[in-house]
Image (cartoon, helix red, strand yellow):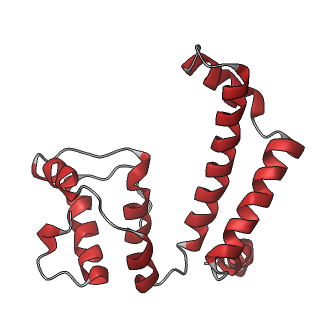
Amino acid sequence: MSAKNYLKYAPFYLVSLLPFWIIYGIARFAYFLMFYVAGYRKKVVFRNLRNSFPNKSEKEIKEDAKSFYKHFCEVFLEAVKLLTISAKNIKKRYFFKNPELLNNLYNEEKSITNAEIEEVKALMGENFYEVTAEGLTAARDKLAVIFGMEDVKTLL
């Protein structure tokens, strides 16, 4: 990678070194800027919410829009934090609530394409858009090492 690319990504790396409480503070500030100052894609967000929830009042739509922006900023900065997060910190913050659901998909060799699998993709350190059964096997093996699982099949 060239020096130019290192400089381009340096701010993200530096942010990833910050503790979570500071990252969430930055996320709240980014939410304020995006929602109140810049209005980033605000018309699109409101239109989509109105189309998706025609029975909701304008007040409810506005609260949902605010929630979306807050969540969007948090998820973005959490993804940046994954650049330098330790295995110990991952174990503290992430767990599998219903591993049987992923096990069933894995056994049926079905692909998973929803956003909830982003953590697995981030842990894999790979740039792929669809997690297949093969990808789940690799992710399961890597997570098993992090979580110290002897029987990796119990993880996913």
Residue nearest the observer in this picture, 90 or 124 = 90
Residue placed at 67% from the left, 27% from the top?
61
Question: Can I make out residue 12 in this image?
Answer: no
Direction from residue 22 to residue 123 in the image, left or right: left
From this view, report whether residue 146 is shown above or below residue 108: below
Q: Quadrant of residue 47?
A: top right
Residue 99 at what x, y percent from top left?
Answer: 22, 58
Question: Can I make out residue 103 in this image?
Answer: yes
Residue 32 at what x, y percent from top left?
Answer: 82, 51
Residue placed at 62% from the left, 24% from the top?
48
Residue placed at 68% from the left, 79% from the top?
6
In this view, which residue lies farthest toward the top? 54
Residue placed at 72% from the left, 31% from the top?
62
Q: How many marks?
A: 0
Direction from residue 95 to residue 86 in the image, left or right: right
From this view, report whether residue 12 is shown above or below residue 3: above
Direction from residue 127 to residue 49 in the image, left or right: right
Residue 91 at what x, y percent from top left?
Answer: 38, 78
Residue 122 at what x, y percent from top left?
Answer: 44, 66
Which quadrant: the C terminus? Answer: bottom left
Which quadrant: the N terminus? Answer: bottom right
Residue nearest the observer in this picture, 147 or 105 = 147
Q: Quadrant of residue 16?
A: bottom right
From this view, report whether residue 127 is shown above or below residue 112: below
